[in-house]
Image: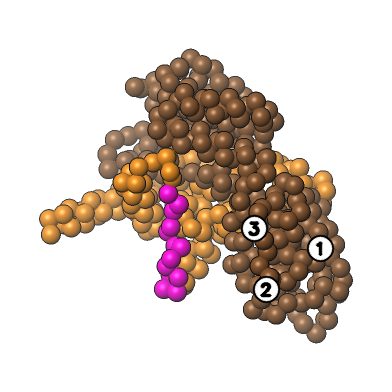
Chain colours: A orange, B brown
Amino acid sequence: MADASAPRLRQLFDEHFDFVWRSLRRLGVAPGEVDDAAQEVFIVLNRKLEQVVPGSEASFLFGTCLRVASVARRSAKRTAHHDSTEEGLELPDPGVAPDTQLAEARRRQQLDAVLEVIPDEIRAVFVLYELEEMTAAQIAAYLQIPPGTVASRLRRGRELFESQVKRLQARSARVEQA
Amino acid sequence: MTEPRRLLDLEGAASDLLRTATSDAPSAASRQAVRAALEASLAAGAAGAVAQASISKVLTKWLLAVPVAGAIGVGATIWLQERSPSFSAPVAPPVHLPAPVAPPAPLFAAPVPAPTSAPVPPLEAVRPAERRRRPMRMAPSDSLGQEMQLLDSARQALGHRDSTAALRLLDRYREQFRSGVLHPESVALRIEALLVRGDRAQASELADRFTAQYPQSPLRARIERLRKQSTEQ
């Protein structure tokens, strides 16, 4: 890495680490793997830094998150039956009561499961709009797609998300009745 | 395009489930761990690239990349833990690991060449998973670690809705780390603490200054949401 790019990389890490971490989680990287995946994203950024146009770093990082998350998900599926001890394990927060933590962890697992059924290109738009609270124009620029495509993917993402939530509710109701 | 209202701003089961994500954020410990691991990886990558150039051309670059970078990565990490004032850790290196072959660069700095006689460890000596994960278990014993601990304590106090304790910890953070690495996080926590205390005016003023100072910060969305929630209550 060139000397000149070191301060830029440091600044980008400070500015975008939280965004990268959240994006990876919402793109399906398990809690126990997300730190490693975030590290991979910034390693890629370091490698390509000279080619990244100033001002488009966040867009580059999100695109890298999409690829790294895709690999991480495939890897997790392959190794799931070998090692289930760390997968999905979240360290307890000593400031929160255990029952609250358990409920939160369960809800996040449900959210992960619901998002998992949404295809990557639709999920990307859905996450950026609904959780990162970007505008459609920003998302179009981020993903380099037309605004109309953003709108249609968001619509589809919402349909899928809401239908999955309904299925989840129905399943929970069945379990409670049983 | 007319933008629909966000699910976070609506009611219903889908919105409730989506709101679960808003509290799922990296901890200061996570940030510190990734930063340290990244430094180690970058140092290892730089040293590995130099080491590879001196190794027999009979072996392919692909075959060498993993063990060389991995071994040097672990070596550099151990060296960091022992020597670096910024990232030292009280953990002794395991005796079975290869000795460090090159001093690591400081955070995100230029690569440091490794000795050309660096030995190639056996394939099973260092697994990629170890290379990545080992630095993440480093204990926070440096100034950044102290920053992190103070902010974690403030966050925990906020978890208990104890704004007084949180603000006291944040005051201490401000005194000790005027130009701290985690300054944006400290400001965001201060805004949250002020809102918990019910001091909306001061929180709003600070939020405006935060937005001006960190226009690209991902913390902005959270701050705006907190501000909005406080006005709705």
User: Crowdedness of circle 1 by 10 Å Cα count: few (<14), some, many (20+)?
Assistant: many
In the image, taking residue A125 as reference, residue B9 lies left or right, namely left
Q: Label 3 is placed on what type of residue?
A: Val
Residue B214 percent across, percent down from the top left: 62, 30
Outermost residue toward the left in this view: A177
Q: Label 2 is placed on what type of residue?
A: His
Quarter holding the C terminus of chain B is: top left
> Which subunit holds the residue at mark 3?
B
Q: Magenta segment, which residues?
A: A80-92
Query: Counting residues from the N terminus, which is met first, the one under dot 2 or under dot 1?
Result: 2
Q: Label 1 is placed on what type of residue?
A: Ala
Residue A56 percent across, percent down from the top left: 65, 43
Depth check, front residue: A103 or A151: A103
Q: Secondary structure at mark 3?
A: loop
Q: Vertically, is B47 above or below A102?
A: below
Q: Residue at x 68, y 44 (%)?
A: B142
> Which subunit holds the residue at mark 2?
B
Disc 1 and disc 3: Cα gap in Å? Answer: 19 Å
**Residue A143 visible from this viewpoint:** no
Query: Counting residues from the N terminus, which is met first, the one under dot 1 or under dot 3?
Result: 3
Count of numbered marks: 3
Residue B96 numbered mark, or none: 2
Q: Secondary structure at mark 1?
A: loop
Q: Vertically, is B124 above or below A118?
A: below
The residue labelled by disc 1 is B102
User: Crowdedness of circle 3 by 10 Å Cα count: few (<14), some, many (20+)?
Assistant: few
> Which subunit holds the residue at mark 1?
B
Residue B226 numbered mark, or none: none
Query: Counting residues from the N terminus, which is met first, the one under dot 3 or under dot 2?
Result: 3
Asked if the residue under mark 2 is in contact with the one under mark 3, i.e. CB atoms within 8 Å, the reply is no
